[in-house]
Image (cartoon, coloured by chain):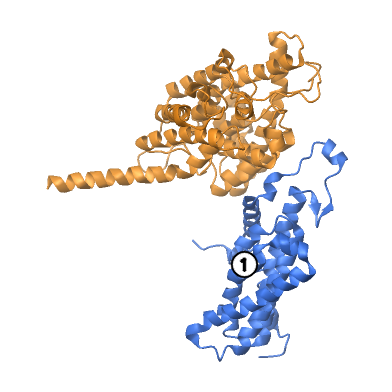
């Protein structure tokens, strides 16, 4: 630690005004404040700073994502070996998945952070740290067969149009990771849904085996067109085809515990998403149309697709969700309910979590406004009646 | 009025094409810019139609501007525009039927194009026929310019063609993993491309930026 600090102090003058690497000032600043909490203090007024700044919060979220990511890597390998019929040990499967997912993480970070660095340098601001989380979320919510160049295009699109044009981290209306997925979903539907993208059919560095036209539908995709899948433990542990990070309920639950324990995410949002989804699923079970997906038990709805992942990591995003405490209940509940409604009633898309969260992102400020106005009028009434 | 091509008249013609573009600066005529720009051909035809109608209606209104009673001027303007739109629509049906099918209602809806009424009210009612003609041509071409740029990007990236001619849909390109971008064919992308053009223009000309 000491050595690292000394090294940073040694190279620091190069990046200051007039130094030879001044063009990379924002990059250096970003890394320095990521590694060490800055010791700068405010110059005016009295401020109390929390020891946890937003870079540390982002790190917590990234740590919380790790179980789902590691399991997703294993699952990518498991699905590949399972579908090709090749025997493989645990480490072979994990290694295969690791090599399949790692390029996506690198592409997402290089493109996203690259744009952030350029914008920060251009606007002479320090680098905003929001992309630390988005960059990890993006590879986790795409199918394993999504080509890297598409990921790069979509990441660039969302960082520029969903984030930088609104003013950067903390100012965005929509969750950038979900915009990336929405862009891919609408621009390249063949590579984002259907039966051929969920299981990789290539061998990577000699691991696995190349098979053409490998198909495997997600359970939700099956429920949409063919039959209601039986509930099984694989749906909870996550050994089913799906986007890389979204399949395992258990791994996501570990992440949820980390988020709630560290206080980064709100239990109110998380809980009400599940309540909304369960209730809407139950309503469709009872009085819904006679389709397979409407008759799918409500607890299966909660386990399948991106429901858990969205509820834990996307809906709780402090920037795009409601900020008032009561608003969080409404916001979460409507996300859960909308996700199930889109799944069941929309003929085109088997999954509705992404669109539900993006839709509620738009309404979050309105919910906050209503909650605040309600509070104002309630207190005004109380003041009047006390006179 | 000075000579036919005085510098003032040149300015009347050229500012709407760049610095005071009806689409990117005044943000008028957006609906049709979204609706007809998924292919280049209808965008060009639409741009030309609007240019012709704006120019002619400007001239006609300018000629009769002193006889129009002020209280019913909007009705008179609408009648003139409607007549011209009908003529253009019939001509398209007669000589370019395919394109007129693609444009469907949007030819008829030129009558509601804000650029037209805006130019009639703001310019033709107060200026002579020659200036009005130049103003109409300038504004129509400014509108057409944006439509063509947007349609060029959308058709090239969305369908891989230009004017229906294959540009990107070859097996070699497909083999390399390239896929046409379906989002380009949807209206939201037209809005984003227009926004990018506005962004570019304002970045280039700081005087267009809103003062805080």
Residue nearest the viewer, comparing B55 with A167: B55
- Location of residue A260 (image quadrant): top left
Which hue is chain A drawn in?
Answer: orange
Q: Which residue is mark 1?
A: B109
- Residue B124 percent across, percent down from the top left: 60, 82
Looking at the image, residue A383 sits to the left or right of residue B46; the answer is: left
Q: Is residue A17 visible?
A: no
Residue nearest the viewer, comparing A68 with B95: B95
- Location of residue B8 (image quadrant): bottom right
Residue under the image location 41 percent in, 46 percent down: A366
- Location of residue A374 (image quadrant): top left
Residue under the image location 68 percent in, 71 percent down: B50
Looking at the image, residue B3 sits to the left or right of residue A286; the answer is: right
Which hue is chain B drawn in?
Answer: blue
Which residue is outermost to the front? A290
- Residue A176 percent across, percent down from the top left: 57, 39
Residue nearest the viewer, comparing A350 with B133: A350
Residue under the image location 72 percent in, 53 percent down: B154
> In this rendering, is residue A277 above or below A234?
below
- Residue A266 percent across, percent down from the top left: 42, 29
For label 1, the SS is helix
> In this rendering, is residue B147 above or below B128?
above
Crowd rating for badge 1 (residues with CA inside 10 Å; few <14, some 14–19, many 20+): few
Q: Count of labels shown? A: 1
Quadrant where the N terminus of chain A lies?
A: top right
Pinpoint the chain carrying mark 1: B
Residue nearest the viewer, comparing A377 with A289: A289
Q: Is residue A302 visible?
A: yes
Looking at the image, residue A133 sits to the left or right of residue A288; the answer is: right
> In this rendering, is residue B208 above or below A79?
below
- Residue A101 percent across, percent down from the top left: 69, 24
Residue under the image location 71 percent in, 66 percent down: B46
């Amino acid at each position: 630690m000491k050595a690292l600090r000394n090294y940073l102090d040694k190279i620091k003058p190069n990046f200051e005004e007039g130094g030879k690497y001044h063009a990379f000032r924002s990059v250096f600043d970003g890394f320095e404040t990521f590694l060490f909490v800055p010791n700068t203090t405010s110059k005016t007024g009295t401020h109390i700073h929390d020891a946890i700044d937003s870079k540390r919060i982002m790190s917590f979220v990234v740590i919380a994502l790790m179980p789902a990511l590691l399991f997703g890597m294993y699952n990518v390998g498991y699905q590949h070996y399972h579908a090709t019929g090749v025997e493989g040990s645990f480490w072979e499967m994990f290694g295969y998945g690791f090599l399949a997912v790692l390029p996506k993480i690198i592409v997402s970070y290089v493109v996203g952070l690259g744009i952030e660095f350029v914008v920060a340098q251009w606007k002479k601001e320090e680098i905003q740290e929001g992309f630390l989380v988005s960059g990890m979320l993006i590879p986790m919510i795409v199918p394993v067969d999504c080509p890297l160049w598409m990921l790069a295009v979509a990441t660039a699109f969302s960082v520029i149009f969903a984030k930088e044009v609104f003013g950067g981290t903390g100012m965005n209306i929509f969750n950038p990771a979900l915009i990336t997925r929405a862009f891919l979903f609408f621009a390249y539907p063949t590579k984002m849904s259907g039966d051929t993208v969920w299981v990789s059919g290539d061998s990577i560095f000699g691991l696995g085996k190349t098979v053409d036209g490998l198909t495997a539908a997600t359970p939700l995709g099956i429920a949409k067109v063919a039959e209601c899948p039986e509930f099984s433990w694989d749906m909870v542990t996550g050994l089913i085809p799906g986007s890389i990070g979204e399949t395992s309920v258990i791994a996501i639950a570990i992440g949820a515990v980390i988020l709630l324990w560290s206080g980064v995410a709100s239990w109110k949002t998380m809980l009400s998403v599940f309540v909304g989804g369960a209730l809407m699923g139950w309503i469709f079970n009872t009085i819904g149309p006679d389709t397979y997906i409407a008759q799918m038990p409500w607890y299966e709805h909660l386990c399948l697709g991106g429901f858990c992942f969205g509820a834990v990591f996307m809906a709780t995003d402090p920037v795009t969700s409601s900020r008032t405490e009561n608003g969080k209940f409404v916001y979460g509940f409507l996300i859960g309910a909308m996700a199930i409604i889109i799944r069941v009633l929309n003929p085109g898309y088997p999954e509705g979590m992404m669109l539900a969260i993006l839709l509620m992102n738009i309404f979050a400020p309105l919910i906050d406004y209503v909650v605040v106005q309600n509070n104002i009028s309630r207190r005004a009434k109380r003041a009047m009646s006390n006179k | 009025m000075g000579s036919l091509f005085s510098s003032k008249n040149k300015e009347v013609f050229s500012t709407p094409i760049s610095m005071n573009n009806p689409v990117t600066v005044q943000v008028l005529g957006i609906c049709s810019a979204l609706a007809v720009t998924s292919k280049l051909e209808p965008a060009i035809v639409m741009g030309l139609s609007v240019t012709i109608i704006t120019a002619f209606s400007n001239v006609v209104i300018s000629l009769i501007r002193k006889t129009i009673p002020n209280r019913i001027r909007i009705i008179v303007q609408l009648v003139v525009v409607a007549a011209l739109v009908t003529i253009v629509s019939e001509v398209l049906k007669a000589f370019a039927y395919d394109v007129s099918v693609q444009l469907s209602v949007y030819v008829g809806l030129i009558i509601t194009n804000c650029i037209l009424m805006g130019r009639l009210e703001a310019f033709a009612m107060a200026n002579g026929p020659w200036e009005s003609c130049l103003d109409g041509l300038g504004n129509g071409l400014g509108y057409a310019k944006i439509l063509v740029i947007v349609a060029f990007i959308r058709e090239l990236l969305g369908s891989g063609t230009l004017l229906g001619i294959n540009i990107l849909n070859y097996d070699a390109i497909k083999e390399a993993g390239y896929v046409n971008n379906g989002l380009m064919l949807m209206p939201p992308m037209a809005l984003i491309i227009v926004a990018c053009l506005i962004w570019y223009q304002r970045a280039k000309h700081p005087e267009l930026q809103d003062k805080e």
